[in-house]
Image (spheres, rainbow, N blue to C red):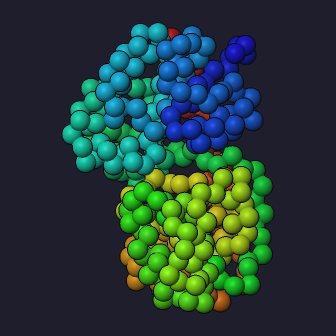
Amino acid sequence: MKRRANKPRILVCGLPFPSVELSGWLRKNGIEARAGKTRDLFLGVTRYDIAHFVYSPTIRLRALFLFPFLKLLRRKTVVHWIGSDVLSVLTRRKPRFITRAVSSLIDRNLAQSQWLRDELTEVNIFAEHISIVPNISIFRPLELPNRTTVLAYIPAQRPDFYGGSIILRLAKEFPAVTFLVVASAERKSTFDNVEYLGYVPHDSMSRLYKRATVLIRMPKHDGLPFMVLEALSYGRYVIYNRPFPNCIYAETHDGARQALAGLLHVDKPNQEGALFARSYIRASVIGILRVYESLFRHRE
């Protein structure tokens, strides 16, 4: 990368898709950034001023070598905790030990959501709540479909962890509602109102948001997934088992059932949700840029 005066050079590494989205936002704002892999730091560390890890590498043994290496070469580090990495340090001894061993070498910890930030404080990791957000700039609430339609994410691995049993129970209770299920390995449903769509590329998700009235997300543990912000940006309603603005909070199956029943006759998109998503995404990008500015200013 050719260096720009007074601009940090960023390598975003970790989970591929959010890394690509974040690096895209950074380039839009005049920052030299690329999405890569951790090994790129060893092969070309002098090309970057800041390493931004999307998903904490501190839950793996290699962190004991990675962070001393970066500190020795005076590279700044940002660790962005986004979900299951937090669950690892909360529930497993080894990741917690490694994280504590390298904690003094990390320049900034960020948490994808407020509840992740709160969970991290339980193990004495103090993070600032700033989200990585989808790289979208058009917030145009679309008209709702004529038939109430639920969009849900139930991956092939650990479907119950993501509330799969709750979603299917709702499908049985609301036979007049269409359920669109992405990421599942299932192809045929025992319910006529459930469509299993399998893997859907991200650039094809817009057509599903257009078909949906509401996104239902009921995982046992979660960060703040892109789906929530994307659904809001399209003016869709969101039933979520985490407290988040402009979403309908439902902690249990009964809560989700009541929330869905309340949306059966809604005929206007979630305008407030779309406005909130726009302001939240912009504020999140600004927050990350300010973190970089602070680190780059104090890099020596």
* Above or below for 211 versus 267: above
Query: For this rendering, which residue is in front, 172 or 112?
Result: 172
Q: Is 72 left or right of 295, judged from the image as shown?
A: left
> Residue 8: percent from the left, percent from the top?
63, 21
* Above or below for 231 versus 24: below
Q: Residue at x 63, y 37 (%)?
A: 20
Q: Residue at x 62, y 81 (%)?
A: 178
Query: For this rendering, which residue is in front, 168 or 56?
Result: 168
Count the numbered circles shown. 0
> Residue 175: percent from the left, percent from the top?
56, 89
* Above or below for 196 versus 77: below
Which quarter shows the N terminus?
top right
Quarter assignment of residue 268 = bottom right
Q: Residue at x 31, y 27 (%)?
A: 61
Residue at the left extreme of this rendering? 93
Query: For this rendering, which residue is in front, 91 or 39?
Result: 39
Q: Is residue 193 visible?
A: yes
Q: Residue at x 42, y 49 (%)?
A: 83
* Above or below for 216 versus 10: below
> Residue 251: percent from the left, percent from the top?
40, 73
Q: Is residue 243 visible?
A: no
> Residue 161: percent from the left, percent from the top?
38, 62
Q: Is 68 left or right of 15, judged from the image as shown?
A: left
Q: Is 136 left or right of 52, judged from the image as shown?
A: right
Residue at the front extreme of this rendering? 188
